[in-house]
Image (spheres, helix red, strand yellow):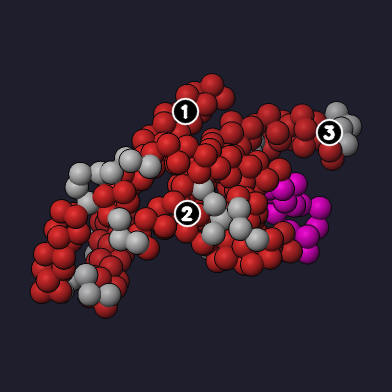
Amino acid sequence: MPQPLSEHEQTLDRYSQGWKRRLLQLLVLLGIILTAAWYVGLLNAGTLAEGVPAIMTLAGESFPPDFGNAADWFLPLVDTLAMSIAGTAVAVLFSLPLAFLAARNTSPHPVVFQLARVLLNALRSVPELIMGIIFVAAVGFGALPGVLALGLHSIGMVGKFFAEAIEHVDEAPVEAARAAGASPLQVLYHAVLPQVMPQFADVSIYRWEYNFRASTVMGMVGAGGIGFELMGSLRIMQYQEVFAILLVILLMVTLVDALSGRLRKAFK
């Protein structure tokens, strides 16, 4: 008759079983990744090698960068920056109430919770580029359709992150506020908001970084900004000017990243 395992042996057995399970999960994940890579042709070395000469030719035609029209890019850059700021502000403004409705611990009713989640999912599922095309058709060319597209799409993402932050708050201050006779709004203001404000600030700043990069793409569908200038240069195959605009965008993204880093430190 086999002897029962000691507590130490049981611990080692559980660890061994857990390790084998994680290894199996890793192998399955690796198999899925390799299958997807093969399906899209990423593992086709011949096709990739054939594209190298064309890439090298295009790179050669892009040098040296042409900054001859750099003075004309200042206002489009301002449009791009303003578009990202306004779009992020719209997203944060509407995400705040939606997040409280979409969080399990603050939503007033399960039906409201589900409706808020569906709304956030719907806004998040439509790419900002598609929204940009729709709003350009609706309100015309310019920065406004870009702001609306970035703002609505961002509500889906920002609202989701806000709601998850709310769901992970410490319940002790919430229970203490309720025990003290605070109303539901007072509980949210005094017990929930102070806990989640740092996360809200981080999410908002990160989303602004993303929206600045996305706003350059908005210009390609007629929503103004530096992306519009980039698309114009691409259409007439002015690759030296395209390279120059890309360098300017890279500089602006670097500056925005540095500024957002300082803002995150300030809100900690």
Extreme residue in the top direction? 266
Which residue is disc 3 drawn over? 186
User: In the picture, which quadrant includes the N terminus?
Assistant: bottom left
Instruction: Compare marks 3 and 1 and give the one earlier in the sequence.
Output: 3
- In the rendered view, does 82 fall on the left or right side of 236? right
Q: Is the magenta stretch mostly helix, strand or loop?
A: helix
Vertical comparison of 244 with 45: above or below: above
Of residue 137 and residue 188, the one placed in the foreground of this image is 137
Q: Start and end of the magenta stretch?
A: 94-114
**Residue 210, image x, y percentages:** 48, 46
Which residue is disc 1 drawn over? 259
**Residue 233, image x, y percentages:** 37, 55
**Mark 1 secondary-structure assignment:** helix
Badge nearest the viewer, 3 or 1: 1
Badge nearest the viewer, 2 or 1: 2
Which residue is disc 2 drawn over? 228
Identify the residue at image location x=22%, y=75%: 41
Q: What residue type is labelled 2?
A: Phe
Identify the residue at image location x=51%, y=48%: 225
